[in-house]
Amino acid sequence: DQQVKQNSPSLSVQEGRISILNCDYTNSMFDYFLWYKKYPAEGPTFLISISSIKDKNEDGRFTVFLNKSAKHLSLHIVPSQPGDSAVYFCAASALNYGGSQGNLIFGKGTKLSVKP
Amino acid sequence: KAGVTQTPRYLIKTRGQQVTLSCSPISGHRSVSWYQQTPGQGLQFLFEYFSETQRNKGNFPGRFSGRQFSNSRSEMNVSTLELGDSALYLCASSLAGWRDSNYGYTFGSGTRLTVV
């Protein structure tokens, strides 16, 4: 069963507008969440993270929102730029789940296309 | 500083063969994790090594194995290759585990394995 779900395989947004990428999870033990961005032929790179003790974390144009009761998080990119076009992965982990630090469990990714 | 280096970048193997992939983590990083990325499944955790010991393991068959050397370099081996093993194999390193930093892992660019 998939514990981290990104239900939208793709998203297309106009440059300058907001991009909202969504992620749902099923394991209530997850206490840390991360977003990674991946360009073709490159490995994923870290974007932003949030601990379960917070409901929002902001870094420049990127904001992650966490709704624990709904087991849902979202990544907002404002304003969107063509260089943001990439695959975005949501990842989650629970301390002491699957090992001493708990491995990261990834969603299947959402391909974002930002059109000029 | 040099990033995570994975070799080779591309590999074509025949069904039934075995393959060894190599990963050199960032200097000073002692934790190395391996992930398999396929279009249908996203990133799936294979295993994590720390100080030459496997600390964490995902749900993959025993054909998938790994090891870590005293210099933290890691190798993963897949025996009796199947067509379904065709994937991008990603290595990720961190100082002592992805929770020791705010940005999780640093990923390499991956090894693209094609099984024919």
Image (cartoon, rainbow, N blue to C red):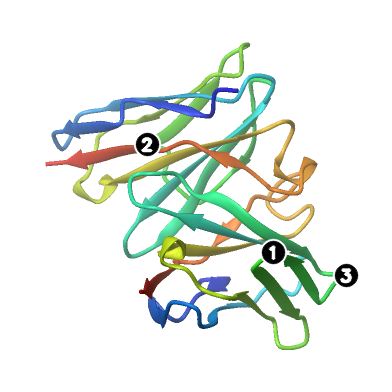
Q: Nearer the viewer, mark 2 or mark 3?
A: 3
**At x 74% / y 77%, what residue is drawn?**
A66
Q: Which residue is mark 1?
A: A60
Residue assigned mark 2: B63
**Mark carried by residue B1:** none
- Is residue A62 shown left or right of residue B101? left
Looking at numbered disc 1 in the image, what kind of residue is underneath it?
Answer: Gly
Q: Residue furthest right?
A: A53
Q: Secondary structure at mark 2?
A: loop
Chain designation of label 3? A
Q: Are marks 2 and 3 on the same chain?
A: no
Taking the spot 26% from the left edge, 38% from the top edge, the residue there is B113
- The total number of labels drawn is 3
Say if A94 sits above or below A17 in the image: above
Q: CA distance from mark 3 to mark 1?
A: 21 Å
The tag earlier along the polypeptide, 3 or 1, is: 3
Residue A57 at x, y percent in the picture = 77, 69
Q: Chain of mark 2?
A: B
Q: Secondary structure at mark 1?
A: loop
The image quadrant that residue A30 belongs to is: bottom right
Q: Position of residue B51 (x, y in %)?
A: 69, 21
Task: Quickly name the residue at label 3.
Answer: A53
Residue B97: image x %, image y %? 72, 38
Q: Name the amino acid, label 3.
A: Ile
| Image vertical order of residue A40 relative to residue B41, above or below | above
| Chain letter belonging to callout 1 | A
